[in-house]
Image: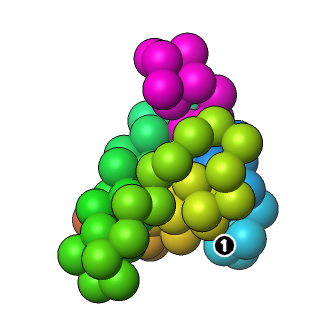
């Protein structure tokens, strides 16, 4: 996949992850993309390690999107735990 495909998958996976996990998150489009890209990489790695499958097959593959969204939810939850609730 090209870098543009990774960015698009990251953006959409990050948006889906933010929609699936309730709560307010700081950051805009760039942070959502970073969460999605890192989540896609994490999801692909976890799919390979846990199930022995290549879960990052292509842009239109369902396994790619499931791995990216699942990984993005994990990254988002870890991000929330690390940043916590900061008072302003």
Determine if residue 35 is in view.
no
Q: What residue appears at the point 72 percent right and 42 percent down from the top-left corner?
A: 60
Q: Main secondary structure of the magenta part?
A: helix
Compared with residue 12, is residue 21 higher up or lower down, i.e. above or below?
below
Q: Position of residue 8 (x, y in %)?
A: 64, 28
Q: What residue appears at the point 67 percent right and 51 percent down from the top-left corner?
A: 61
Quarter-wise, where is residue 85 in the image? bottom left
31 is within the stretch colored magenta: no
Q: Position of residue 28 (x, y in %)?
A: 61, 32
Q: What residue appears at the point 69 percent right and 59 percent down from the top-left corner?
A: 62
Q: Is residue 49 left or right of residue 63?
A: left
Please name the residue that numbered disc 1 is placed on: 21
Residues shaded magenta: 1-11
Quarter-wise, where is residue 47 in the image? bottom left
Compared with residue 44, is residue 77 higher up or lower down, i.e. above or below?
below
Determine if residue 60 is in view.
yes
Q: What residue appears at the point 35 percent right and 49 percent down from the top-left corner?
A: 41
Compared with residue 57, is residue 70 higher up or lower down, i.e. above or below?
below
Q: Is residue 21 left or right of residue 81?
A: right
- Front residue of 67 and 18: 67
State the residue lying farthest toward the left: 49
């Amino acid at each position: 996949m090209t870098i543009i495909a990774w960015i698009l998958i990251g953006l959409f996976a990050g948006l889906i992850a933010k929609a699936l996990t309730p709560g307010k998150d700081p950051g805009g489009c760039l942070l959502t993309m970073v969460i999605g890209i890192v989540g896609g990489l994490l999801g692909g790695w976890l799919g390979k390690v846990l199930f022995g499958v290549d879960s990052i097959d292509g842009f239109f593959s369902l396994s790619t999107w499931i791995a990216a969204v699942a990984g993005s939810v994990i990254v988002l939850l870890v991000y929330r735990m690390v940043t916590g609730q900061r008072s302003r």
